[in-house]
Amino acid sequence: MLKRHWPSIRDYVLILLGTLCQAAGLRLFLVPARLASGGISGIAQLINHFTNWPIGLMIFLGNIPLFLLGWRYLGGRRFATRTVAAVAAYSLFADLLVLLPFFPPRGITDDILLNALYGAVVSGVGYGLVYRAQGTSGGSDVLARILNHWRGIPMTQSYLMTDALVVLAAGLVFGWKEALYAVIVLYVSGLVADAALEGGGTVRTALIVTDRMEPIADRILHEMERGVTILHGTGGYTMSSRPVMYCVVSRSEVQQLKTIVNEIDDKAFMVIGVAHEALGEGFKPLKNL
């Protein structure tokens, strides 16, 4: 019974861990340095500056209209459960952390650059864990998806529009130096979120066009112990049919693959690409996901 529900349990555990990271990044680094990095949490920081209202509570209230729009445009109940869990947990952690007796109320450091970088890294890890659990953190994430679904605006442009307005407002309230550092937070947290979402299993893919397919494939299979798939291609200039070899290797094996191809056919054509993850035999097992 537990095994059947394990994927859902795991997702909600990741959501709790992710939102705790987000709240820690917000409270330890971003709020003390007055870095409003976008989204509803950035707006909540700006309102808190003038009213001293609880940031977590304002994050939760600010997400209610976006949640209602998301229910309509982004899939109803399927969208709702993980989003509600993520927003509620993030809002709760954002206000509870500052009540802990050992929590530094003014953050860890006064250095704005350290606050920007560490705030981005910790928050980015949190975002990545929530995304890995198939959830959203509300705010600009939901608004960007709504704009993409409703008006066909690309996701990257939607994020840029929504977060840029918040950063602009932060520049007017906190100062333009803080706004410029907030842009760094946005950029770095996005990179870290991608890394946390996709994991550290970046691999390399290789497409090889050669007249000596069999000896190359044989050495890849037996020396590198990697699989090879033969695709059927057609030359655009000659229109003649010729095979194309496709294989996936780790980063450390790229040079060995190049050496094998060069030794057998130095006139071969090879393209090395990047894949974020490889699942199956020789890599991460699918059954462990």
Image (cartoon, helix red, strand yellow):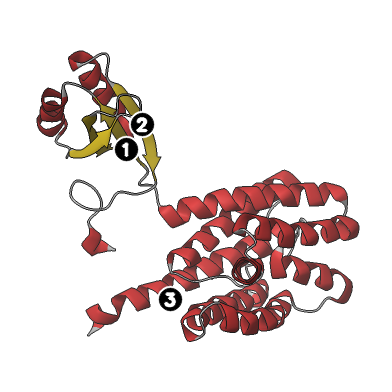
Residue underneath mark 3: 12
Of the pair 231 and 97, the residue shown nearer to us: 231
Residue 230: assigned label = none
Q: Position of residue 143 (x, y in %)?
A: 66, 70
Label 2 SS: strand
For the residues labelled 1 and 2, say whether their Cβ atoms are less than 8 Å apart. Answer: yes
Label 1 SS: strand
Q: Is residue 111 visible?
A: no
Q: Position of residue 258 (x, y in %)?
A: 28, 22
Distance Cα–Cα, label 3 vs label 1: 33 Å
| Disc 1 packing (10 Å; few <14; some 14–19; many ≥20) | some
Distance Cα–Cα, label 2 vs label 3: 37 Å
- Total marks placed: 3
Lower position in the chain sequence, tag 2 or tag 3: 3
Identify which residue is drawn at 25% across, 24% down.
Answer: 256
**198 displayed left or right of 231:** right
Residue underneath mark 2: 272
Label 3 SS: helix
Q: Position of residue 87 (x, y in %)?
A: 59, 77
Q: Position of residue 272 (x, y in %)?
A: 36, 31
User: Quadrant of the rendered structure where residue 249 is?
Assistant: top left
* Kind of residue sitting beneath label 1: Thr
User: Quadrant of the rendered structure where residue 67 is?
Assistant: bottom right
* Kind of residue sitting beneath label 2: Ile
**205 displayed left or right of 27:** left
Q: Quadrant of the N terminus?
A: bottom left
Identify which residue is drawn at 46% across, 81% down.
Answer: 78
* Kind of residue sitting beneath label 3: Tyr
Q: Is residue 45 visible?
A: yes
Of the pair 61 and 121, the residue shown nearer to us: 61
Distance Cα–Cα, label 1 vs label 2: 6 Å
For the residues labelled 3 and 1, say whether their Cβ atoms are less than 8 Å apart. Answer: no
